[in-house]
Image (cartoon, grey):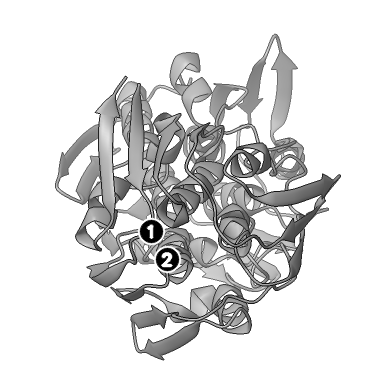
Amino acid sequence: MDAFEIRGGLPLRGECRVYGAKNAALPILAATVMVDGTSVIEDVPELEDVRVMMDILRSLGAHVTREGNRVVVDGSHIVETTVPSDLMRKMRSSVFLMGPLLGRLGEVSVSKPGGCVIGQRPIDYHLRGMRQLGANVEERHGTIRCTANRLIGTSITLDFPSVGATENLMMAASMADGVTVIENAAREPEIVDLADFLRKCGAIIEGAGEDKIRVVGVHRLTGVEHTVIPDRIVAGTLLIAAAATKGNIALHHTRPEHLGSLLGKLREAGVQVEVDHDIITVEHVGQLHAVNLRTAPHPGFPTDLQAPMMALLTVANGASIIREDVFEARFKHVNELCRMGADITVDLRTALVRGVGQLSSAPVEASDLRGGAALVVAGLMADGTTRIEGLHHIDRGYQQLDAYLRDLGAEVARREL
């Protein structure tokens, strides 16, 4: 177990490149089990969740190698259809193997997935969709087994635009017989990236990024090269941290169109934001202003940036209202922020954040990935040295975050406990 020690009060300044998106890389890696041949995936971040996914692919019989940020997967000889329960518990995204294995081999067995505890994230949407595609689904003793002689295209309407369900069903439908239409589909950029990869492999997909996706099943997908899109959540976290510390940074290799809602809220808070092709620059030297925000599926404000944005608003002038409409248990970072002097009141899914003049350093602990990022932002602002434990959560979504911050002028040390 490690901890961060952050000396606050130093503005972030400089430039850095944003690496590939974890939430795009994971489903794309899962999709490689459907591919006949070798897939080369570029700009894959070095994260614990990615390492777990690579281990799962190997356990299924794939040959997986990594050199830097390039991952090469040859899934030609996959015959195993059971995802090891110990690996499944480590990462929620392992549920993405359901659709690809069912589509290619007609069978898959998984245990209930793990990951951050940020509220109810049932996989009912996934299972209901698999049944509609013709799969037989059995749930016993914490294990889910899906079988199908052949998946059959159909019309599926999601009760909620679930990102994971949209991706899983899109992958399964890519190798089903006939046409599948997914209504009320999620519209996140990571879904578009997965569809782009599948189309390169030979899949026929229309409408990714819209609320209606049409998939024409094919019988074979072939290996290709693909580069993962930049991580919009990492980019957003760094932009928030720069604004919070009254710094000035330029992020290269971004997709500004993926961050429209965040950039709008930063501007509303008094931050100067400039966009030039794939470069986003933020600067703030005055007083931050309170803003109200509500999380929502894309293109709304990302739930994954709610916690870091809350940290910034703890020192804004006035009172901000934050409504969390995606996950009901995503305010676990509030108590830790209050230990640092924040004034936050939570009522069910709504938080009232009254700005204070200064946060103070304190020992705190991350209980989930994005809440941990919020504590890092708070530590960068706070007076004194903040100690943050629970780094295994942060490591799941941020590649060498301490090194990135040091390159931007922060004083961050990683200590063994």
For disc 2, the neighbor class at 10 Å (few under 14, some 14 to 19, many from 20) is many
Residue 245 is tagged as: 2
Residue sitting at x 70%, y 70%: 212
For disc 1, the neighbor class at 10 Å (few under 14, some 14 to 19, many from 20) is many
Label 2: state its secondary structure. Answer: loop
Residue type at mark 1: give it.
Gly
Q: In which quarter of the image is residue 389?
A: top left
On screen, residue 225 above or below 256: above
Q: Is residue 110 left or right of residue 251?
A: right
Residues at badges 1 and 2 in contact (C-beta under 8 Å)? yes
- Between 224 and 376, the residue placed more toward the observer is 376
- Between 287 and 165, the residue placed more toward the observer is 287
On screen, residue 199 above or below 132: below
Report x, y in % for residue 167: 57, 52
Quarter placement of the C terminus: top left
- Quick one: label 1 or label 2, which is nearer the N terminus? 1
- Between 311 and 81, the residue placed more toward the observer is 311
Report x, y in % for residue 71: 22, 46
Residue type at mark 2: give it.
Thr
Residue sitting at x 76%, y 44%: 132
Residue sitting at x 53%, y 54%: 174
Q: In which quarter of the image is residue 178?
A: bottom right
Q: Is residue 130 left or right of residue 12?
A: right
Residue 298 is tagged as: none
Residue 9 is tagged as: 1
Q: In which quarter of the image is residue 98?
A: top right
Report x, y in % for residue 239: 43, 69
Label 1: state its secondary structure. Answer: loop
- The answer to whether residue 400 is visible is no
